[in-house]
Amino acid sequence: MEQKLSDPFDSLIIEGFGDYYKKEKGVFYEGKCYLKTKTDHFKSHWAVLDGNEILFYRKQGEDDSRVMHILACAFIQEISTEKDPDTNVNYYPIKIFLPPVKSRIIYFETIEQQQDWTKKLK
């Protein structure tokens, strides 16, 4: 007579299923950036790239994000430098094309930050 081996997962009880959000997140990349307001002012934010999502917080360490985008099927493009008319500071932007017809421009203080974020986003 053939003996059937029991599957070890048959008796496995999964506790806390659905509590995955309570675990520590695996942040891929994060740093300071700027977003433009409706009145064309540059406002400092903290960007967090987590999996295929990018979240924007007003300050580092905050729990509630101000803006979030899912980057699935998004396209990334570095665009030309933009000068803040109030401070004469140059910002180095990246444009994220979000399906179906939206986009978000993220601004950085240095060209090195722009290039690092472009690599990470791609």
Image: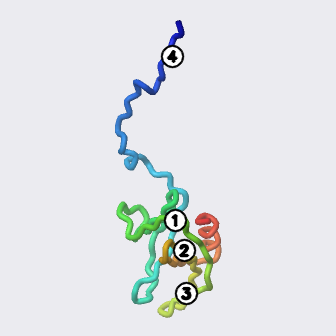
Along the line of sight, the residue nearer the viewer: 114 or 4: 4
Q: Secondary structure at mark 3?
A: loop
Q: Which residue is mark 2?
A: 96
Which is more N-terminal, label 1 or label 3? 1
Neighbor class of circle 4 (other Cα within 10 Å; few <14, some 14-19, many 20+) is: few
Q: CA distance from mark 4 to mark 1?
A: 44 Å
Looking at numbered disc 1 in the image, what kind of residue is underneath it?
Leu
Which is more N-terminal, label 2 or label 1? 1
Q: CA distance from mark 2 to mark 3?
A: 22 Å
Q: Secondary structure at mark 4?
A: loop
- Nearest-to-viewer mark from 4 and 2: 4
Neighbor class of circle 1 (other Cα within 10 Å; few <14, some 14-19, many 20+) is: some
Looking at numbered disc 2 in the image, what kind of residue is underneath it?
Ile
Mark 4 in CB contact with mark 3 (< 8 angstroms)? no
Residue sticking out furthest to the top: 1
Looking at numbered disc 3 in the image, what kind of residue is underneath it?
Val
| Mark linked to residue 71 | 1
- Nearest-to-viewer mark from 4 and 3: 4
Which is more N-terminal, label 3 or label 2? 3
Along the line of sight, the residue nearer the viewer: 26 or 96: 96
Q: Quadrant of residue 81?
A: bottom right
Mark 4 in CB contact with mark 1 (< 8 angstroms)? no
